[in-house]
Image (cartoon, rainbow, N blue to C red):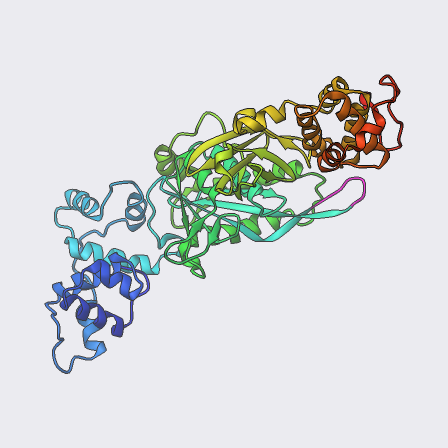
Amino acid sequence: MPTQRLSMRRIREVLRLRHQGLTERVIARTLGVSNGVVHGYVRRARLAGLSWPLPEGMDDEGLELLLFPAPKAASQSDRRPSPDWVYVEKELRRRSVTRLLLWEEYRAANPDGFGYTWFCTTFEAWKQRAQPSMRQTHLGGEKVFVDFAGDTIDIFDPITGEERAMKLFVAAMGASNYTYAEACPSESLSDWIGVHANLFRYLGGVPKFVVCDNLKAAVTNPDRYDPGINRTYAEMAGYYGTAILAARPRRPKDKAKVEVAVRIAQRWILARLRNQRFFSLAELNAAIRGLVVELNARQMSGFGSSRTELFAEIDRPKLGELPDQPYVFARWKHCRVAPDYHVEIDGHWYSTPYRLIRELVDVRIADKTIEVFHKGQRIASHARAPNRRGHTTIADHMPSAHRRYGKWTPGGLIAAGEKIGPSAAAFFQAVIAARPHPEQGFRTCLGILSLARSYDNARVDAACRRGILIKARSVASIRSILKSGLDRAFLDETSDHQPLRHGNIRGQGYFH
């Protein structure tokens, strides 16, 4: 049963809906509680002999007495030994250990001991009086709770004296309260992933679940029933073989373990370091590690053991194995493929197969690689380019016509123009030089080369000479000169004349 009881009105609603034939799962979803809560109240009603409708005149007080009978106190003459409830609480954190098993062991040691019902009822009452850190039962190696502390700690630039606030990441194992803490520059996704990798290395293994708060680096949609986990965070969890459980919004009890651990860390770590000055993050984290070791080695009141001892006994044997290499951080971006079959990442353009033009793709961006996925399948991989405002294109991604076009370079086009004539080569230089990027002039040059299939080289060269004089820079202008015969006035000039010089013409050697 939950620590916080439902109101009598809601308990009556549970019994009414069960009488109507609704399943416990449907009732739980309707009332916004867990399946276990509904099952517990239905079971209590059955043990009390209650059915719906309730007896006439039964008020809330009478219903509560029937559902939650007070445990019978043992008489002074009753010398039967009571179980060690601290030991029971500790053993229940082990996987597959049940209350029935512990009661059977208790009765085996004490044949005249109390019955199972008394055992369970008294244990629940003891838990109500126990410390808050003992109210939840967690299996060994099952959960680690993670969060950032609200307070920060500063590091100072040794040259300028400028101070920077560092965030404190705190994690606590559910069963043993074993605590980890680390300072990092921010709550950004890259820092969030980095501290998790360090946490798993510190634990020496991986818990089954990671319970986190609804910070932006972890949860993209903080929905109570269907939270959206950040894709990079989910990918990291899959890499380590764990799963992410997001706490419900505005439900601090879902992560009470780490809430307590954060308070302890702020008092045990941040308060102790408040008067020290640190000049690097590494220096700060070295001091934090020493205090964390001391914290975990301290005896916990009510447990008779330290966090380190409990971790070694309960949690550590149940942790999953670490992978050989730590997870390499990568972020994801949702992109639509541009008409030139490229996607833009940080100002640089990377190619995809041309058939995916206008399709939505997912891009995984790592330090050294760019991977493009379409419907879960990787369709492109590139080495990450160090420069911005450029293109990285794989020839196999291009249509056949574009592959032929892609073989051209500025120098190659000018050399092809020289085969037509010196004026054509000069015209090509002028066209390429007039564009912000040389590639933008390639189509014009290729268009002039195609005119040589309809007109002889001499006429095309003469038309280019006239085009240079009138500062024409398009295929349409040269084609118009040829169609109207305006090129003929230049045919009589010697063919070995030097190409025209112009301020916009950089010369063939510029492009090599």
Quarter of the image holding residue 313? top left
Which quadrant is home to the C terminus?
A: top right
Who's the residue at 70% across and 47% down the image? 164
How many marks on residues? 0
Question: Relative to 124, is 463 above or below?
Answer: above
Who's the residue at 53% across and 26% down the image? 400
User: x%, y% of residue 216?
Assistant: 52, 51
Q: Which residues are magenta?
A: 155-161
Q: Is residue 365 magenta?
A: no
Is residue 179 shown to the viewer in this render? no
Which quadrant is home to the N terminus?
A: bottom left
Q: Between residues 80 and 173, which one lies in front from this camera angle? A: 173
Who's the residue at 51% across and 34% down the image? 354
Q: Between residues 334 and 505, which one lies in front from this camera angle? A: 505
Who's the residue at 58% across and 28% down the image? 402
User: x%, y% of residue 263?
Assistant: 52, 54
Q: Between residues 508 and 384, which one lies in front from this camera angle? A: 508
Q: Is residue 156 magenta?
A: yes
User: x%, y% of residue 206?
Assistant: 41, 35
Quarter of the image holding residue 393? top right
Q: Between residues 22 and 133, which one lies in front from this camera angle? A: 22
Q: Which secondary structure dominates the residues rendered in magenta?
A: loop
Q: Is residue 397 left or right of residue 87?
A: right
